[in-house]
Amino acid sequence: MQRHGFNAATLLRVPTMKWRKFLKRLGFSPPKITKTLEGMPELTLQPTLYIGHTQEALQDAIDNLQEILLDKGLIASKTRRFDQDTKAAVEEFQRQNDLRVDGVVGPLTWSALLYPTLSYFDAVPAEFEPHVRKLQHYLYKERLLKEINGVFDRQTSRSVRRFQRRYGLLADGVCGPITWSFLLGQRLAWGKGDDFGLPPWIKSLFLDQAPVILALFAGIHFTPLEEGQKFTVLETVVIAYSLICVAQPILNKISEFLPIQVGQDLAFFRFSQYVLVGFFWRHILHWVKTILL
């Protein structure tokens, strides 16, 4: 498998942060919360109604909000009214946390106010253990986690990714405001029938990735650019998954400029493009290696 100094296992040793920087250089980055929340402001202005929603409950919420803003140094004192200073403080908090700056304290803003952003790649302070346990409790209820230990470990990060994939969120394993709001109830009921009764990781591996892997497999094995060198199934799968990490965002970007909807107007193009990527697998991965290493 050696040529241009490349080995299929090389990319498995590349630190995660280098991959992120590499994709950022290509111009691919996760969508900011601000962009995903553009919508009808009149919906965000409607109150959440429930049994026990009284004027006293509303006053308690305003007091709680101002206590948090006072703790963060965003207001000078509590007024027990949602006044102009409180609105300005909420807007500043939203600006600091990449939320839509509208001064409205909705589910996402409450999530950011009440719960910290948790990530496996960042150190989680000991005082956040109650929040980690709460996160793990909801993951346990979703049958995505088997143990509640108060530690944001690798298994918790994997469970967060599975939860995010299940509800159509960006599966980055980071529990931020959007993931918290979904965990705490801002979501549709999930039906097992939608996933054919399969666990999420099996669905992702066999139903979502299998056609792509097969197309790349064909391209790698039948490329006219090689000298007839063949690889084992395991070696081919390693190469194919490495190509997915690079080719998927590039192909998604290219499809934005096509005059057709890939997968609808030309359904065959959805996977045949990966055969072409497989033809040039060595050149693509060599280019990635020169950038990352």
Image: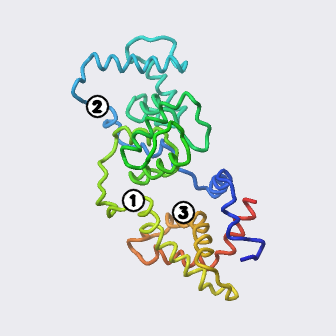
Pointers 2 and 1 in contact (C-beta within 8 Å): no
**CA gap, disc 1 and disc 3:** 30 Å
As drawn, 54 above or below 20? above
Query: In front of the other: label 1 or label 3?
Result: 1
x and y, in percent, of residue 28 in the image: 58, 55
Query: What x and y, as percent, mark residue 238?
Result: 61, 70
Identify the secondary structure beneath mark 1: loop
The Cα–Cα distance between marks 2 and 3, rounded to whole angstroms, is 38 Å
Amino acid type of the residue tagged 2 in the rendering: Thr
Give the class, few, some or many, for how many residues have Cα within 10 Å of label 2's Cα (few <14, many ≥20): few
Secondary structure under tag 2 reads: loop
Please provide percent x and percent y for residue 170: 48, 51
Residue 165 lies left or right of residue 213; in this view the side is left
Instruction: Name the front one of labels 2 and 3.
Output: 2
**Which of the image's four quarters has the N terminus?**
bottom right
> Circle 3 is placed at which residue position?
253
Mark 3 Cα shell of 10 Å, populated few (<14), some (14-19), many (≥20): few
Colouring: rainbow
The mark that comes first in sequence, 2 or 3, is: 2
- The image's mark for residue 199 is 1
Where residue 120 sits, quadrant-wise, is: top right
Mark-to-mark CA distance, 2 and 1: 33 Å
| Vertical arrangement, residue 209 with respect to residue 137, above or below | below
**Residue holding disc 2:** 48
